[in-house]
Image (cartoon, rainbow, N blue to C red):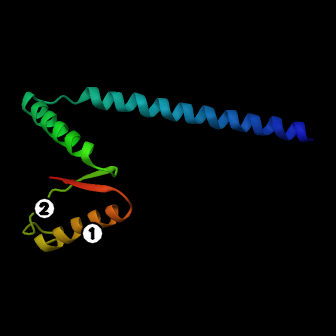
Amino acid sequence: RFLETMKSDTKLYMIRLAYIALAVSFVTVNLSRIKSSYDFSNNERRLLSAVKIKDHRQTAERKRPVIHTFFNRIAPSKKGTGMSGKSDEEHVAAWKEQWSNAGWDPVVLN
């Protein structure tokens, strides 16, 4: 009975391993498609390169891992946003505080 259980567990393990391998290959293929389907202009490449260099220099000085978010303020005059300049700042400050308390160095990109 023990051997039957082990064989069953081994088969289940192999099936799970196959599913994981399939999922990883699916993600890898789709990410490469996304990356190759979007091309940056020369100006965008220069800007991204400058941002990457600046971020690398700042990251080298940090002791904590870095977490990034992008925040683009929507004008409160647009209907349905429900946000104001003050509430935007409070929202970003709360995000930074929570990640900082969790041991990360939060960086807001805009």
The disc at residue 94 is 1
Residue at (46% x, 31% y) in the render: 26
Residue 54, picture quadrant: top left
Q: Residues within 10 Å of mark 1 (few under 14, many from 20)?
A: few
Above-or-below relation of 14 to 103: above
Q: Residues within 10 Å of mark 2 (few under 14, many from 20)?
A: few
Closer-to-camera residue (97/13): 97
Q: Which residue is mark 2?
A: 74
Residue 4 screen position, x and y as percent: 87, 37
- Residue 3 lies left or right of residue 47; in this view the side is right
Residue 78 screen position, x and y as percent: 9, 66
Quadrant containing the N terminus in the rendered view: top right
Closer-to-camera residue (100/4): 100
Residue 29, picture quadrant: top left
Q: Can residue 94 be seen?
A: yes
Residue 2 screen position, x and y as percent: 90, 41
Q: Can residue 82 be seen?
A: no
